[in-house]
Amino acid sequence: MPNHVVTFAVALAVAGLGGALVWEAGANLLLLHSWVPRDTAFFSINHPSWSLSAEMVFYALFPVTLPLVARVPRRHLVTAGAAVVVVVVLLPLVAQQLPVGAVFGPAHAQSPLLGASVLQVWSVYAFPLVRFLEFALGMLAARAVREGALPRVPVVVALGLVAAGYLLSLVVPVLWTLDAVFVLPVTALVVAVAQAPTPPAVLTTPLAVRLGEISFALYMVHDIVLTATRRFVPAAGLPPLGAVLLVALVLAVSLGAAWALWRWVETPANTRLRALRLPSRAARRRPAAPAVPAVVPLTVPATASSQEV
């Protein structure tokens, strides 16, 4: 939440409201905007924040969902997960039955979404209850990994699936590119890394660990940096060398801004939140330690011999 508030203010200073109405910006600040099927709402101000709005719903439903996932018999975990994957893959077919209505306009000229139905895209991409399916899938996958209900998935195979999903996304209609073609490959990759007896060496280096620490902050700042630099790109584009230099500059600025956000906002906020954490249930039930009586020092009376000079 602190990262969201800070990046909301920065994005507002950089680009203003954009196409958003004031009430849509307010919904964004309160993380309610992914419920609104308008691109000026769920993509308002700092575009990536739509996912935080959806995640608020996930965490709110977690206490209700956890007992349900726990009741799934071990032998049915894979079947339940596969059923969720099938539903996610088929949802674009349902979305296509919705009215086309408004479409993504010139503000998305450099996006594959240009000309696509806002309502249909929202229904498979930003609608919290639809994206909750993947959250539930993650819970099922976590149980399956913990209880050994899945065969071992090599990381290399999972990476191959992700690459295949990307290639497939280049040729299928846009509604499938938003989630359907990636849900199985990404789940497989998460499972493969979780099953590995030791983390891949490339992920344990100090650089990789630090990049992991700032990854959420990078997610929150990257679109702001892109928006700020886009105005300096001429309509005719840049020559190859200029494009490469611009990409390098954007990456460097994004990483620097992400580190600053992580170091000066996210880390202090997490420290304060941990300090406010309520005691665990076990700690609350633990009986108080009996009072220890004060220790009174004993005075040894002086002997006659000790008083002699």
Image (cartoon, helix red, strand yellow):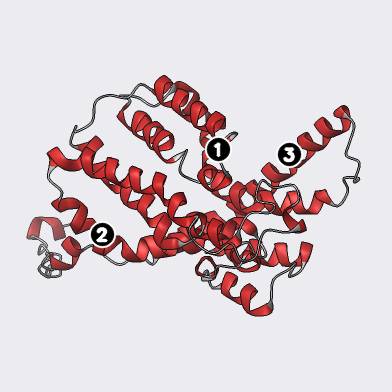
Above-or-below relation of 147 to 268: above
What's the residue type where badge 1 is placed? Val
What's the residue type where badge 2 is placed? Thr
Label 1 residue SS: loop
Judge by depth and name the residue closer to the eye, 17 or 266.
Answer: 17
Mark 2, residue position: 65
Distance of label 3 from label 1 (alpha carbons): 33 Å
Apparent side of residue 238 relative to residue 223 in the rendered image (left or right): right
Q: Mark 3 and mark 2 in contact (Cβ < 8 Å)?
A: no
Residue 307 position in % (x across, y down) = 15, 60
The part of the image, by quadrant, that contains residue 153 is: top left
Q: Residue at x 31, y 47 (%)?
A: 84
Q: Residue at x 63, y 64 (%)?
A: 39
Label 2 residue SS: helix
Judge by depth and name the residue closer to the eye, 52 or 254.
Answer: 52
Label 3 residue SS: helix
Q: Which mark is residue 172?
A: 1
Q: Mark 2 and mark 1 in contact (Cβ < 8 Å)?
A: no
